[in-house]
Structures are given as structure tokens and as C-alpha cells.
Image: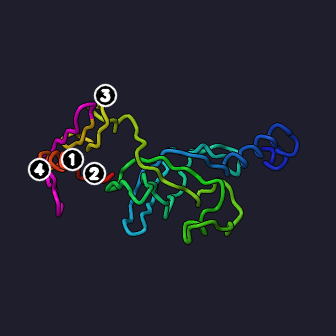
Amino acid sequence: MPIPINERIKNNEIELYNVLMDRIFNSMRVSIPGIIQEFDPVTQTASVKVAIREHVRQPNLDYEWTEIPLLLDVPVVFPRGGGYVLTFPIKSGDECLVVFSDMCIDAWFASGGVQNQIEKRRHDLSDAIAIPGLWSQPKRLEEYSTKHVELRDDTRTKFIRITDSAIDITAPRIRINGNNITTQEAYDNWINGGGRVDE
């Protein structure tokens, strides 16, 4: 007759230790690759599927590969500062890095500033933050430039490249909109005439 699970644990200190360690590690998150399922451009949040299954010990002490539940309303990080921001048209299927905050971020995310925790929790699934840009090998970039800074699309059919001597723009169509577009000649005349160049 099989020994009941509680008896196996009670009579085996190593097994008890392993069960406790499993519970601790399975409740603490740090970071993991994810796949964006949906992006809301109004709230700038996403639903994210964790891209790695977890080997979880079941109540019968056996292990099973288990998918982590879909993460909802995950704030998405874009490079931002000084009144400027670089945004991307996030799409379903984009890969990202999911980081789990040390503490509950609900109050801060809703109100900004410095807030108290609404709930005492650490590294919880509820406090995920998505950083787009991490990618797996099947999505690696072709024609990666090792010499220049580039803002480009995945296929590199459209890009802006900064080199030591120039800024190159390659695209099927280039549009420049502005109320006052200055040519190099007008710029030179402005400088030579003693005008001021705004920084």
C-alpha cells in the first residue's frame, strides 16, 4: 500500500526541505521572456504570455510542466525623459522582457509620485512590467550594423543611420513637415550674418 504524501513528508526531512524550497522559489519572480498578446495604446499596457513553462511540484509531489497564467494590464516601458519619448507600434507576437517589481506597484501606477503599498507582496505576477526589445534567435535581425547607430525596421528596408560623417536616411518615401524648414545655405548665411543658433 502506498505511503500517504503527508507521511512521506513528515518522515523525510529532506523531502520536507525540498517541498518548502519549491514553495518559496515558485512564489518569487525576477524576470523572464514574454510574448505580447495584446497592446492597449490608450493605457499603454499589454497582456503578456510568459514564454517559458515552469516545472511545478503538484499536490501528489510529482512535477508537471505548467504555463504561468496570462499577465494582464502590464505597463510597457519606452525610452522616455526630458519631455521626449521614443514609442514603438507594439504588436501581438512581439517578444519582451518581463520584470517583476520588488513591491506592489498598483498605487504608484494609478497615481504616480511616491505611494504606500496597497498590498504587501514581493516579486508577484501582479507587478509585472514589460520591456520590448528582447528577442529569441528566430527573430534575430539580419544585416545588423556593427559600426553605426540605426533606427530601422526589422527588414532594414527603412532606416536612419548615424555615421561619423553623416546621417543617412533610406526609405521608399521621405516626408518633412515644418513651418520653417532651413536649407544648409540659409543656415550658413544665418551663421555668417551673426545670427544665433538655438541649442
Q: Is residue 122 magenta?
A: no
Q: Depth check: give the residue in front, 16 or 48.
A: 48
Q: Depth check: give the residue in front, 71 or 193.
A: 193
The answer to the question of whether label 4 and label 1 lie on touching residues, with beta carbons closer than 8 A, is: no
Residue 115, above or below 15: below
Q: Which residues are magenta?
A: 163-183
Q: Depth check: give the residue in front, 152 or 84.
A: 84
**Residue on which the image places disc 1:** 191
**Residue on which the image places disc 2:** 197
**First along the sequence among labels 3 and 4:** 3
Q: Position of residue 22 (x, y in %)?
A: 71, 45
Rounded to the nearest angstrom, the CA distance separating label 2 from label 3 is 30 Å
Rounded to the nearest angstrom, the CA distance separating label 3 from label 4 is 25 Å
Q: Position of residue 179 (x, y in %)?
A: 17, 64
> In this orientation, does residue 112 appear?
yes
The secondary structure type at the circle numbered 3 is loop
**First along the sequence among labels 1 and 3:** 3
Colour convention = rainbow
Q: Is residue 179 magenta?
A: yes
Residue 170, above or below 73: above
Q: Amino acid at mark 2?
A: Val
From the viewer's perspective, is the residue at label 4 or at label 1 nearer?
A: 1
Q: In which image quadrant can residue 151 be found? A: top left
Residue 32, above or below 42: above
Rounded to the nearest angstrom, the CA distance separating label 1 from label 3 is 32 Å
**Residue on which the image places disc 3:** 147
